[in-house]
Image (tube, grey):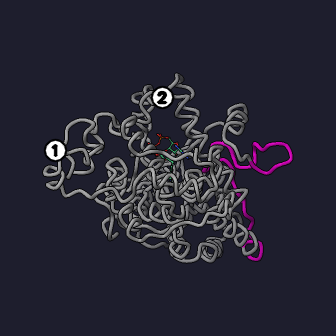
Amino acid sequence: STAVVLFTSDLRVHDQPVLHAATAGHDEVVPLFVADPGIAGAGFDAPNRRAFLADCLAALDTALRERGGRLVVRRGDPVEQVCRVVRESGARHVHVAAGVSAYAGRREERLRTELARAGADLTVHDAVVTAVPPGQVVPAGKDHFAVFTPYFRRWEETGTRAALAAPRVVRVPEGITGEPLPERSAVQGVSPGVVRGGEALARERLTAWLSGRMESYEERHDDLAGDATSRLSPYLHFGCLSAVELVRRARRRGGVGAEAFVRQLAWRDFHHQVLAARPAAAWSDYRSRGDRWRTDEKEIAAWREGRTGYPVVDAAMRQLLHEGWMHNRGRLLVASFLTKTLYVDWRVGARHFLDLLVDGDVANNQLNWQWCAGTGTDTRPNRVLNPLIQGKRFDPRGDYVRRWVPELAGLSGASAHRPWRLDERDRARLDYPHPVVDLTEGKERFGRARGLDAT
Ligand code: FAD
């Protein structure tokens, strides 16, 4: 028999339940990727991700060819394209990974209906994108966990499924045509420092991480200049790596670094299970607090461009512009700055992140933004991160600021965080803006807006 594997956020051959089931259960498989213009229509297309995706597809095609197969690329509505490939190949079965977004949900529903009409069935596989499938651990009488700590306790007890080996052989039926693979070099407007994508590279990075810097992750993950996190997020986003495999391999390695790393992977699952239960939380407040956000276009532009006058905020925003990636500590503090100090709608920030992040992800981005804005799952929704304190703690020598804000490269040590302390002549010589807002004023304004006691 013949089956179609529709690849989505699972562009790999190792620990790939969808491909595994299809190759184990059928003689021939059509490995299909559909370039879906609807992704752009839904606002999730960005040059940085398109460039990275081109690498991922090329790597997937190579991995399939090493197994005797190849990747078939089509363009258009994924449901129509799958049905067309089903007709052309005579397949009676389609396999796909479960998604968590409203978009994936609609695609799955339409696939089910249209395939039934075409006389084919659909198998949706769990635990492909996340380590523990959404809905597998839930509090009594509820459909998802709204607080991380109890979720994490249950998540840890539950454990993951076993990891699967890559198929040895992938046999593709004759005569199924596809489009040429998209090319990274054809994508315009890519940030200069965007990393290369693909499973082979991802696996090298993972192995290096597990046997190297993961050990010190617990102490160093918040060190902005040390850059001591795994940087695996884009590979996880496109599914070049499996979250199940990561959790299992990190646990096997053991130690406090591995534990802290696995906990972050649980955060990823946590946000996915929130979105799966509340797909509207992609753009609507998870917990509406009746915020009447400010819209000051000048302040928003200063934030986007990394010219707020707060060095650590600007450094992080410029890292994003340059690499299409930002350190987690940076993400936390720039999101707090936008939504609390400037009191701008989190959707403005989430949109900007999605336009640039290589790992830009509907679950992780939108729900982390809501967490930072206090409309999400943070149990302390009114905390405001002070960029000066954050800078002092997480970039104590000012190295991160000097790396990303060249105007301040001449300032030594922690003084890079406080250019306003220079004497007037030296200050005037720097082409660096004055702070867009006074921190105390911002905090008071936020407090008043949220109806908090000033004390
Ligand atoms: P590591 O520290 O090495 O962590 C390992 C993995 O755990 C990450 O690759 C990621 O998959 C997962 N992870 C870590 N922290 C989180 C978290 N808070 N929430 C969910 N998963 C996490 N992550 C994305 O993958 N895509 C996004 O679009 C995204 N947007 C964010 C927006 C904001 C405002 C904030 C505060 C965080 C966002 N994150 C997002 C989470 C986090 O910042 C990144 O996953 C992390 O910085 C990626 O770097 P790393 O791979 O080196 O992470």
Q: Is residue 176 left or right of residue 86?
A: left
Give the SS element for disc 2. helix
Q: Between residue 79 and residue 216, name the one nearer to us.
A: 216
* Pointer 1 residue: 410
In terms of image quadrants, where is residue 124? bottom right
Query: From mark 1 to mark 2, how far is it between C-alphas?
Result: 32 Å
* Pointer 2 residue: 218
Q: Is residue 252 left or right of residue 93?
A: left
**Quarter the N terminus occupies:** bottom right
**Quarter the C terminus occupies:** top right
| Residue for point 46% across, 59% down | 342
Mark nearer the N terminus (1 vs 2): 2
Q: Give the magenta-colored segment's residue range.
A: 115-144
| Residue for point 38% across, 62% down | 304
> In the image as oriented, which residue stretches furthest toward the top?
255
Is residue 164 at least partly visible in the picture?
A: no
> Which kind of residue does numbered mark 1 sit on?
Gly
Viewer-nearest of discs 1 and 2: 1
x and y percentages locating residue 449 in the rendered image: 59, 59
